Image (tube, grey):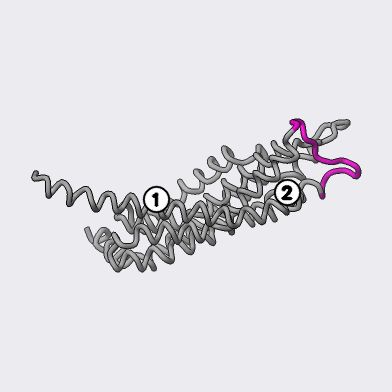
């Protein structure tokens, strides 16, 4: 390979790396732009996060901080996470702007609705966990506490616990998007997905048992939506992936 060929190959690579750097910087600045105002209301944000538990504690009970810096760093940490969640559309836009030039026209038409739906589903999973799952879980945990034991949760450990629940439900609600992508890449067809329903039911409950607290209520509240979203994913794949019905027909005839 000549020196000119090497130079011509290196230039596109450098251009892509510079573009990637610019997009990453825009993501960082976008998150920071949201984060800075939230630092002034970090305590109020954490109070909102703790509300599902505080409402169920006995009169006079409260949360505690077992580390010296927890009262400061825990709300700030949560504010940073809230800032990132709020900035997700901006983050996805930067990702889209970076990869779009390398996509075909039909792929571009599919990426935008998938990004939009994945964002909304992630937000929906978090909202479902906050308004329905957390109160149910805390009611169960407080209800099974032995007599004479006062529930007093550390604020940092509470944040870690709640974030784990949010992440589990946010990711679980992405099931339809993952299924559409699998069908789009030709990995599987909607008909084969439909044929695996019984395994999905078992898998959903096993997954829920692993990533949720050890109570049957929260496990059911994760497993049932995951299965329903699985059904939504089958329908979405047949609608959004052109040719999937033809592939199913060919497989049935074969």
Residue at image coords 12%, 49%: 4
> Which residue ends up furthest to the left in the rendered image?
2
Front position in the image: 248 or 26: 26
Residue plotted at (31% across, 55% down) = 185
Pick the quarter of the image with the N terminus: top left
Q: What segment is highlighted magenta in the picture?
A: 55-68
Residue 179, x across and y down, in percent:
41, 55
Disc ID at residue 152: none
Residue 33: x and y in percent read 58, 57
Q: CA distance from mark 1 to mark 2?
A: 33 Å
**Label drawn at residue 21:** 1
Quarter of the view holding residue 68: top right
Reply yes or no: does residue 14 show up in magenta: no
Residue 19 image point, x, y percent: 35, 55
175 sits to left or right of 86: left
Mark 2 highlights which residue?
Answer: 46
Element at badge 1? helix
Q: Secondary structure at mark 2?
A: helix
Membership of 56 in magenta stretch? yes
Report the predominant secondary structure element of the magenta stretch.
loop
Q: For this view, does 32 lie left or right of residue 114?
A: right
Q: Can the viewer see residue 227 in this picture?
A: no
């Amino acid at each position: 390979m000549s020196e000119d060929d090497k130079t011509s190959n290196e230039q596109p690579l450098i251009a892509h790396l510079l573009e990637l750097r610019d997009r990453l910087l825009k993501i960082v600045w976008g998150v920071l732009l949201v984060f800075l105002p939230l630092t002034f209301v970090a305590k109020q944000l954490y109070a909102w996060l703790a509300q599902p538990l505080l409402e169920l504690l006995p009169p006079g009970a409260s949360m505690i901080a077992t580390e010296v810096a927890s009262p400061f760093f825990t709300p700030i940490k949560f504010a940073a996470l809230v800032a990132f969640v709020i900035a997700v559309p901006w983050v996805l836009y930067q990702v889209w702007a970076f990869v779009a030039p390398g996509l075909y026209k039909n792929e571009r038409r599919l990426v935008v609705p998938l990004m939009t739906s994945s964002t909304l589903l992630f937000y929906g999973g978090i909202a479902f966990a906050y308004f329905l799952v957390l109160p149910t879980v805390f009611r169960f945990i407080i209800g099974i506490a032995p007599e004479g034991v006062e529930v007093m949760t550390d604020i940092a450990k509470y944040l870690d616990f709640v974030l784990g629940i949010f992440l589990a439900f946010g990711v679980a609600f992405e099931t339809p998007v993952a299924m559409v992508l699998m069908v789009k890449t030709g990995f599987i067809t909607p008909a084969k997905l439909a044929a695996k329903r019984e395994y999905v039911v078992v898998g959903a409950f096993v997954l829920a048992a692993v990533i949720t607290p050890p109570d049957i209520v929260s496990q059911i509240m994760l497993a049932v939506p995951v299965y329903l979203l699985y059904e939504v994913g089958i329908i979405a794949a047949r609608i959004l992936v052109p040719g999937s019905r033809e592939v199913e027909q060919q497989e049935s005839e074969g």
